[in-house]
Image (spheres, grey):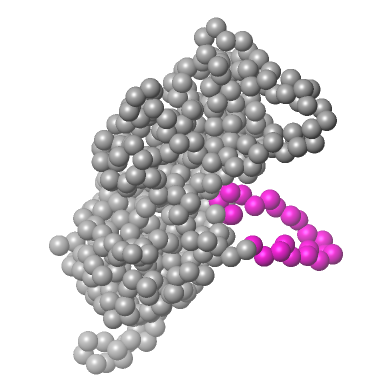
Amino acid sequence: MPIEIKMPALSPTMEEGTLAKWLVKEGDTVKSGDLMAEIETDKATMEFEAVDEGVIGKIMVAEGTDNVKVGTVIALLNGEGEEATPAPAAKEKPEAKAKPKNVEAPKAEAKPAEAPKLAPVKSDGGDRVKASPLARRIAAEKGVDLSGLSGSGPNGRIVRADIEGAKPGATAPAGAAEAPAMAAPAKPATVPDIPHEATKLSNVRKTIARRLTESKQTVPHIYLTVDVRLDALLALRAELNKGLEKRGVKLSVNDLMIKAQAVALMQVPACNVMFTPDQLITFSRADISVAVSTPSGLITPIIEGADTATLSSISTKMKDLAARARDGKLKPEEYQGGTASISNMGMYGITQFDAVINPPQGMILAIGAGEKRPWVMEDGSLGVATVMSATGSFDHRAIDGADGAAFMQAFKALVESPLAMLA
């Protein structure tokens, strides 16, 4: 019997995607690990690998199709000795002919397509959970219990994408199914009769709209701003870049901001948190999600362990992540997660702004442009200094105003005395 190839959940938040391109055609033989298709998720375009061996019997969803729900059958894979014509298609036609007068038949046939949810994990005749070898290895490394997970692979098999969203000890992947209910979408606005160009929304743009709307509707934001003198940090950056020149590393101001935010989070752990309906999660390291603008929309690749990483490693990794983010080549684990975010619009001349929290994180730091301003010096005299405004947006359900203020104070101190973040 043909194996159903279903639209996979390539990220924990993915509910639907675009089948951008088929890399195989009907009649092609595939084996486990072969690339079958390119799928545009809510964050990037990713390659979908085959799990089982066989021959592509029928492609059910044409390339370029938008809004394909996770769990929808996109192709049929025939095993050895099976005919190219898929068995399910042969059975459907006689049923339609056997009941020509049954007006309820079309509704019955439409039902499976209305709820293409992830198939539950099935066993192979005993208690053994169906999972690919790679998924088993990743699950073992992360300490994830496979028995309670739902698989998006053929016949409900658990694949890598199902594991990546699960937490250690979890019995179900962290996904959009547990997200808070959203308000009913507004009716589309009437487009005025003015010359214009209409561009179809990408999956990334749809996800940005959905998540930011969710954030502003469900997360009570509190905003705290400090003015920070940059002269010492700029001097240190120039000195470090001179020493790193032979290694081909050039630190940006943003690299130092990432480091300062991460160290400040370790100094004020009350801000390195995530709010859940019944728990407050406090993280023991600072993974910083960095906002990167791409042609399809904003994405936030993550610098893991930025509090202990060297500046040169932060700079090198950030350049790589940003380049691959713009090309849509990030892996899910490179943009999913993070304990806090940072958004820098200083390069556009923006002096101050309030950023929207990226849930379920508890805070985001908005960095403005450095500019010459009057400044009261240490000796009390009035001078001119390079000053930057930084604004922290905090989830007031999880972070009190005093804790947010303590974080901003720690961040300011680290930027104005930058050697402290390197100690």
420 shown above or below 83: below
Residue in view at x 48 percent, y 51 percent: 177
**Residue 105 lies in quadrant:** top right
Direction from residue 372 to residue 327 in the image, left or right: right
Residue 379 lies, in percent from the top left, at: 21, 90
Residue 40 lies, in percent from the top left, at: 56, 41
Q: Which residues are magenta?
A: 185-206
Q: Is residue 40 visible from the viewing direction of this image? A: no
Residue 49 lies, in percent from the top left, at: 47, 28
SS majority, magenta: loop
Residue in view at x 68 percent, y 50 percent: 200
Magenta stretch encompasses residue 189: yes
Nearer to us in this view, 250 or 49: 49
**Residue 386 lies in quadrant:** bottom left
Direction from residue 30 to residue 199 in the image, left or right: right
334 shown above or below 79: below
**Residue 375 lies in quadrant:** bottom left
Residue extending farthest to the top is: 81
Residue 24 lies, in percent from the top left, at: 58, 22
